[in-house]
Image: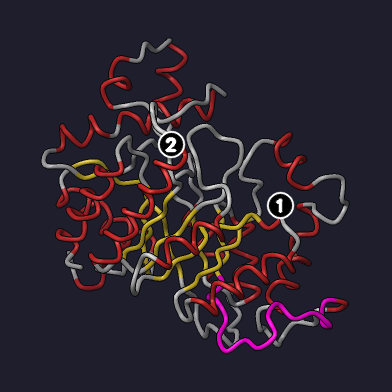
């Protein structure tokens, strides 16, 4: 691994709920994982937004960001991401302005366009307002940027609003995506871009990053393109053990595609799951955990990903049954990566 591949590493977390445990257990586990990442030298700790899912307790990123930031020292804490079509831009701006005031220089606001849930739940989140639609995403994103200090943008009617009365600093704003759409939006607005490679089954990462870099327009906050790529990882003492611990991630990936949602099962339960021929065929197409092995194995795979994509940073996801497994993975990868 060369110095050019040793880019900063970060962590993406969903506060996953495992069988036999509560949402409170999941949230406490997330905070412990964040403290481990902070101690090890990871750059960022991001929290996803998902709704009405038995296995995910990360439903309100700003609330969880506040808890994590209060329990850590130096690591950036942020959203991976806030799903903007679910929220009024002014509400998001106020929430993140408060977080930034409490933890200046440590708050990231990652913005996504997907609902983070099924259509029925999205409708429950958005109500009947014609204002909260995917079609109005570009307008809402620009309003949000203006409310958080981007003076390039005419905020229109929102210009009379202040997200906070006396801001000293603003959160770092990222565009997230798993398609070329997000890449082009990030390029046009001069934002850093995070590509969700960890769940992109038919990944278009090469096309997306080419469009982002070739179309990038410098902004007051970012003079040149900046890319972060996600990957799903599990590290253990042996490659065989890592593959065993990755079993729950494969069951989770299958359940998402088949609608058989439930809490995260144990590795033992995952190994005992009876699969139909259709399930097996579908599993062959699902990413599950992309890099499972020893710390050195995972680091080698991540280095190859950096070499392929030219990523400036990587962010590590990972569906596991026990938070201790996630912490152990972070320890092993950090050591192998040289954090």
Q: Was residue 233 drawn as part of the magenta stretch in this picture?
A: no
State whether residue 103 is above or below residue 325.
below
Side (left or right) of 115 relative to 238: right
Is the residue marked by circle 1 packed among few (<14), some (14-19), or many (20+) residues within 10 Å? many
Dot 2 crowding, Cα within 10 Å, few <14, some 14–19, many 20+: many
The magenta region covers 158-173
- Image quadrant occupied by the C terminus: bottom left
Residue 210 placement (x, y as % from top left)? 51, 64
Q: Is residue 285 above or below residue 304?
A: above
Magenta: predominant secondary structure element? Answer: loop
Q: Are marks 1 and 2 in contact (CB under 8 Å)?
A: no
Which quadrant of the view contains residue 31? bottom left
Q: Position of residue 201 (x, y in %)?
A: 48, 39
Q: Nearer the viewer, residue 112 or 287?
A: 112
Circle on res. 23: none
Q: Which residue is mark 1?
A: 86
- Percent x, y for residue 28? 38, 48
Q: Secondary structure at mark 2?
A: loop
Between 262 and 233, the one nearer to me in the picture: 262
Real-space Cα separation, disc 1 to disc 2, in angstroms: 23 Å
Q: How many dots with numbers?
A: 2
Q: Nearer the viewer, residue 216 or 146?
A: 146
Q: Is residue 167 magenta?
A: yes
The residue lying at 85 percent from left, 56 percent from top is 131
- Tag shown at residue 17: 2
């Amino acid at each position: 691994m060369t110095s050019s591949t040793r880019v900063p590493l970060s962590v993406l977390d969903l506060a996953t709920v495992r069988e036999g445990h509560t949402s409170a257990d999941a949230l406490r586990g997330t905070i412990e994982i964040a403290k481990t990442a902070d101690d090890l030298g990871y750059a960022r700790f991001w929290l996803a937004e998902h709704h009405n899912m038995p296995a995910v307790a990360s439903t309100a990123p700003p609330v969880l960001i506040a808890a994590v930031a209060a329990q850590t020292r130096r690591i950036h804490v942020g959203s991976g991401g806030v799903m903007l079509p679910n929220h009024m831009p002014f509400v998001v701006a106020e929430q993140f302005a408060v977080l930034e005031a409490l933890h200046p220089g440590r708050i990231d606001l990652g913005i996504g366009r997907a609902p983070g849930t099924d259509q029925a739940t999205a409708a429950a989140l958005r109500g009947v307002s014609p204002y909260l639609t995917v079609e109005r995403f570009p307008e809402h994103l620009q309003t949000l940027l203006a409310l958080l200090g981007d003076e390039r943008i005419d905020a229109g009617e929102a210009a009379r609003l202040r997200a906070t009365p006396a801001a000293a600093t603003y959160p770092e704003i990222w565009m997230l995506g798993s398609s070329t759409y997000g890449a082009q939006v990030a390029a046009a607005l001069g934002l850093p871009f995070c590509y969700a490679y960890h769940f992109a089954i038919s990944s278009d990462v090469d096309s997306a990053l080419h469009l982002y870099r070739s179309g990038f327009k410098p902004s007051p906050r970012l003079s040149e393109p900046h890319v972060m790529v996600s990957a799903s990882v599990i590290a253990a003492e042996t490659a065989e053990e890592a593959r065993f611990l990755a079993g729950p991630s494969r069951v989770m990936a299958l359940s998402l595609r088949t609608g058989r949602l439930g809490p995260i099962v144990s590795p033992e339960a995952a190994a005992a799951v009876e699969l139909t021929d259709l399930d097996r065929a579908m599993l062959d197409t699902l990413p599950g955990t992309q890099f499972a092995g020893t710390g050195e194995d995972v680091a080698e795979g991540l280095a190859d990903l950096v070499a392929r994509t030219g990523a400036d940073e990587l962010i590590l996801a990972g569906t596991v049954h026990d938070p201790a497994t996630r912490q152990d993975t972070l320890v092993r990868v950090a050591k192998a990566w040289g954090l």
